[in-house]
Image (cartoon, rainbow, N blue to C red):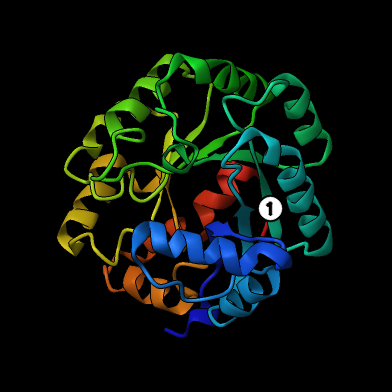
Amino acid sequence: MEPQALLIADAHAHIFPAKIAQKAVGAIGDFYSIPMCHPGSPQALLDSGSAIGVKKYLVCSTATHPGQVVSINSFIRDCCGEHPEFLGFATLHPDYQDIPGEVRRILEMGLRGVKLHPDFQRFSIDDPAAFPLYEACAEAGLPILFHTGDDRYDWSAPARMAAVAGRFPRLTCIAAHFGGYNHWQDVEVYRELPNVWFDTSSALFRLPPERALQLIEVLGHRRFLFGTDFPMWDHRQELDRFLALGLPEEVRDDILSRNFQRLFGVEL
C-alpha cells in the first residue's frame, strides 16, 4: 500500500527556531550517539512528513532550564499559527517559578499539552518537586508527553512513570518510546494504568518486532500513537518500520491516526 493511502498523524515531533536549530539537533544527536536525519525546522518537518502524507503533527520542544519556558512556548504557539497541520505541546520545568500562571497562558495560546524530558531536564519523574506541575496539568486537562526510559539513567525509568500515573489518575500521560526507551523489559508495569498512553517513536529501530507486537497486545493497541521523534528519524523510514510489524488493518489504522483523533478530539 502506498503511504498516501493511509491516514497518518505524527504524535511526536520536535521543532526549533532557525537560529538554534542546527545546534539543538546536534546536541540531541550527541546525547544519543545517533546521527540526525533532518534539520529541526518546521519546514523540514513538513517536507519529511509530506512524503508519507502526514495530516497532523504533534510538535514540541524541551526547556532544559526554567528560563527557556516562556520563549519556547511562544515559539510553538507561533508555529501552530503559521501551520494548521501542527498541534502544539508546550514545555514546563519543575523549577519554573509560576507554573499555574504559565499553565493558564498555555491554555490561552491554544496549546494542547506539555512535553517533559526528565533526562535532559535532570529530574526524576516521580520527584515530589514535580507534583505541583502534574497537578496543574491534570486540573487544566493538559496531557503530558514524557520521554521515558534510558539504560544510562534512572530519571525516566518506567517504574517512576508508573508511580506518577498511579498518583495522578486524572493526568493523561503519554509514555514515549513504547513506554521506556531501552527498558522494554519493564514496561508492562503500565498494564493496569488506563491513563497512560504510548507512542512508537525511537523504538522500532531497536525493539525486536516480536516484543513490539507483544507490548501492543498486552498494553492495548487503542493506547498507542504513531510517532517519529523527528528530526532524529525520517518519516518514510519510521513508517516502513511500523508497517513491517504486519499488524491487522484495524489495529494499524488505530495507531496511525484514529487513536490520535480520539485523544485530542481532532479531525484529520
Q: Position of residue 254 (x, y in %)?
A: 45, 56
Q: Residue at x 46, y 59 (%)?
A: 28
Q: In this view, does 148 lie above or below 192?
A: below
The answer to whether residue 51 is seen in the rendering is yes
Q: Quadrant of residue 8?
A: bottom right
Identify the residue shown where x is 25% and y is 38%: 187
Residue 24 in the image: above or below residue 91:
below
Quick check: 80 left or right of 268?
right
Percent x, y of residue 73: 73, 44
Q: Residue 78 appears at what percent x and percent y? A: 82, 55
Q: In this view, does 239 lie above or below 12?
A: below
Q: Residue beneath label 1, please?
A: 87
Q: Can residue 256 be seen in this view?
A: no
Can you tell which quarter of the image residue 175 is in? top left
Q: Give above or below for 120 relative to 133.
A: below
Residue 215 is left or right of residue 166, and the answer is: left
Quarter of the image where the N terminus is located: bottom left
Side of 214 where 52 appears, left or right = right
Task: Provide residue 59's location: percent of width, then percent of height.
Answer: 63, 55
Mark 1 belongs to which amino acid? Leu
Q: Give neighbour class at mark 1: few <14, some 14-19, many 20+ (Cα, 10 Å).
A: many
To which quarter of the image does residue 155 belong? Answer: top left
